[in-house]
Image (cartoon, helix red, strand yellow):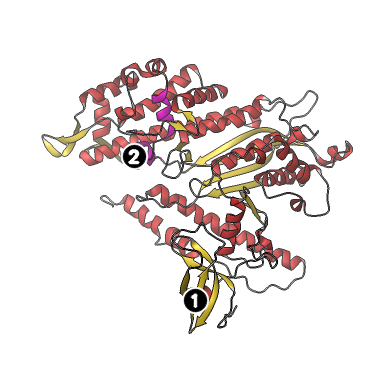
Amino acid sequence: MSLSAGSTSCVYIRDKDNAWIPAEVVSESSGNISVRINHKFDDLENCSPGELRDVKLKDYEGGVLPLQNLDNDTGNLIECSDMVDLPFLHEAAILYNLKIRHKEGKPYTRTGDIVIAVNPYQWMNQLYSDETRYLYADKLIWTQTKEDAKSLVEPHVYETSSLSYRGLAVDGMDQSVLVSGESGAGKTETVKILMNHLASVQNMASGNESDGEVNDIVKRVRDSNPLLEAFGNAKTTRNDNSSRFGKYIQLQFDAEDPRQAAFSGRSVPSCILAGSKCSTYLLEKSRVVSHEEGERAFHIFYQILGAPQSERENLWKEGLGDATEESFRYVGYTDTHEIEGKSDGERFYETVSALDLIGVNSDSLHTLLRAMCIVLQLGNLVFDKDPENDENSTITSSEELSKLARLMGVDEDDISKALTIRTMVARNETYKVPLNKSSAEDSCDAFAKEIYSQSFDWLVRTINSATCAEDNYIVEKNEKAPSKFGMIGLLDIFGFESFKVNRFEQLCINYANEKLQQKFTIDIFRSVQAEYEYEGIELGDIQFEDNAGVLDLVEGRMGIIAVLNEECVRPRGN
């Protein structure tokens, strides 16, 4: 677009508080343009409708301002459920289209095969009712149509689950769903909504809109999620229930042979949820020993401390009897005692109940929760310089050490040596190297993080044992067990993160997102290129943002990871 003097084009201009602001061009002079802020938008920060501003075209890509998508009849911005249909597609148009739909109570918007969700921070009953779930399953799975089935329904996360189910049942291809976004965007909740819909779709095949009776396997699959939240989620500055780990859930289905379905007069073979497996990665172990002001450690610590006194005394009377959050350094003060409307004490019973469902009860439950107590107590140890040698260290909190020793069932002297002396093995010789105060504190924190990490991994393995189809799925009489299960994978991954203090976890999280962004971009443009070639349409070079430079900075021959590896093997690396 070229702007001429006196034109009244409707455009967007950049703004530090609002990102983009709708405006009307008033005049142009020597590369400078005078615009008037659009009076129809009265919810903008630090700007007034009708306000005049001067902008420089050189500050915008191509020397032009992005155009608004206006309805010729009303003069209002066009709202599109699928943003592929926007006449002018750019960052500002995308943001304002999402904003309009969000204000109208429509959190979901489509971009081709991608569903974008803007978190409404409230539960919208009409969006997730039994009728809505049945509608999407009926239109996108069971109904046969020659037109694009997505055009029959509004964008919704149920659209993704329904099309995934159909892709597995009808096309016989395993499916994967990627759920990504920044902290607080609603990733964890979205995965739960997807799982619930996929678990209940087969019950809708007969037109039954309710879930009906839920078998034990489906119940375990559904109820295992609160366990992962208890041990893997925490309050952050942006989200009270933020997942501090990534997970890949593989829902396993007993998929019917299409030939058998056709013989029975059904166009869509049945797909029965038979079990699930879960892989986790990038657990934020640093949160075990420290967290920013206004945040919390993992939920399970607060659930234990929020349990009734009788439960705490039964678990560890000496340390938990009269304890509060401030009794443990790793936890500390918090003014948050409810997560999503339920107290930590109520969540404790939910966690214990869910653990019982997967077979963790009695002795195994006691052992798991006492391991959490050991982690808490490790944070109370105090280290100081050895009076006889400043390069050595000693534990000065004798009472806290005694409590830890009795809790672990290990001699005090053994614990003290393990935390203040490093054992090194070189060839056939063993060396004892004393640690200074700082190194001993790091050793203690590392021990606490390792206990927590190993406990978390054990819990994930236990959940998998209780939910995997190979060990738990029982077929009907006279039916043969499937040799292979169909799979729908749900990948729930952190979005890009940037905190006041960024640690190794943030580097790994952002690196993983850069890799996913590269794969996503390549796959999308490859699919477009393949579609154009199939239809015989000439396609020129496609220009897109390439993050190869960022990836090379991280994973290249002299990248950050290579430098970190080198520093780790140096005697005094930093």
| Label 1 neighbour load within 10 Å: few <14, some 14-19, many 20+ | some
Q: In the image, which residues are magenta?
A: 285-307
Indicate whether 184 appears above or below 328.
below
> Residue, x 39% and y 57% (percent of image)?
560
What kind of residue is marked 1?
A: Ser
Q: Is residue 388 left or right of residue 19?
A: left
Q: What residue is at 68 percent from the left and 28 percent from the top?
A: 473
The answer to whether residue 139 is above or below residue 88 is above
Q: Is residue 26 above or below residue 209?
A: below
- Please state the horizontal and vertical placement of residue 9, each as a whole percent of the image: 59, 74
Provide residue 259's location: percent of width, then percent of height: 85, 40
- Answer yes or no: is residue 543 visible: yes
Disc tally is 2
User: Circle 1 sits on which residue?
Assistant: 34
Q: Earlier in the sequence, mark 2 or mark 1?
A: 1
The alpha-carbon separation of the residues under discs 2 and 1 comes to 51 Å
From the top left corner, tell me how far across and down residue 41 is, in percent.
Answer: 55, 60
Front one among 57 and 518: 57
Observer-nearest residue: 566 or 72? 72
Contact flag, marks 2 and 1 (Cβ < 8 Å): no
Q: Nearer the viewer, mark 2 or mark 1?
A: 1
Residue 290 disc label? 2
Nearest to the observer: residue 156 or residue 365: 156
Assign a secondary structure to mark 2.
loop
| Extreme residue in the left direction | 388
